[in-house]
Image (tube, rainbow, N blue to C red):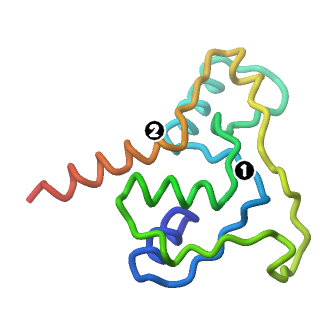
């Protein structure tokens, strides 16, 4: 399961969901990853390319946006700082990606919120189908 699935399940079943406010990521919509891969396949260019979303968000911010978008209860979200929770391994606080090389090729990923809205629209469309 993905991080998104884990969050949704925790929220739906009202399980405590500890989300860090002090770790930044750049979540990317899977359709945008596919577009980036296609862009690089059709425009071969050497080097390393990062494909992250346009928003630098904490996991807490992602959870809050998810709750608003999917109309989920947020009471089970526990806001925490990284040092509040013991971890097996050290993680960087900011793992956001610079995607300037893909941007130079014309790649423009959607925001986290827009990607969630698309997921919700697809889910609603598939739920309405017999």
- Relative to the observer, which residue lies in front, 109 or 17? 17
| Label whose residue precedes the other's in the sequence (2 or 1) | 1
Residue beneath the point at 72% across and 66% down? 20
Provide residue 115's location: percent of width, then percent of height.
46, 42
Residue beneath the point at 72% across and 61% down? 21
Badge 1: how crowded within 10 Å, few (<14), some, or many (20+)? many
Residue beneath the point at 59% across and 43% down? 28
Residue topped by disc 2: 114
Element type where label 1 sits in the image: strand
Residue topped by disc 1: 25
Determine which quarter of the picture holds residue 128.
bottom left
- Looking at the image, is 88 positioned above or below residue 91? below
Q: Quadrant of the C terminus?
A: bottom left
Total tally of numbered discs in the picture: 2
- Looking at the image, is 105 positioned above or below residue 49? above
Determine which quarter of the picture holds residue 48.
top right
Element type where label 2 sits in the image: helix
Determine the residue located farthest toward the front in the rendered image: 75
Determine the residue located farthest toward the right in the rendered image: 90
Badge 2: how crowded within 10 Å, few (<14), some, or many (20+)? few
Residue beneath the point at 48% across and 67% down? 5
Give how far apart the Cα atoms at labels 2 and 1 are: 16 Å
Please indicate whether residue 4 sits to the left or right of residue 48 in the image: left
Please indicate whether residue 74 sits to the left or right of residue 118 in the image: right
Provide residue 54's location: percent of width, then percent of height.
64, 34
- Relative to the observer, which residue lies in front, 82 or 26? 82
Determine which quarter of the picture holds residue 90.
bottom right
Provide residue 121's location: percent of width, then percent of height.
29, 46
């Amino acid at each position: 399961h993905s991080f998104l699935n884990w969050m949704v399940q925790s929220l739906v079943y009202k399980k405590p969901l500890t989300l860090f406010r002090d770790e930044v990521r750049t979540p990317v919509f899977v359709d945008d990853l596919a577009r980036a891969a296609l862009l690089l396949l059709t425009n071969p260019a050497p080097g390393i390319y990062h494909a992250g979303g346009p928003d630098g968000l904490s996991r807490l911010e992602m959870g809050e946006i998810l709750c608003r978008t999917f109309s989920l209860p947020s009471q089970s979200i526990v806001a925490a700082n990284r040092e509040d929770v013991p971890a097996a391994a050290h993680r960087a606080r900011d793992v956001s990606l610079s995607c300037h090389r893909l941007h130079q090729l014309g790649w423009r990923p959607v925001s986290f919120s827009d990607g969630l809205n698309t997921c919700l629209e697809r889910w609603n469309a598939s739920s309405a189908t017999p």
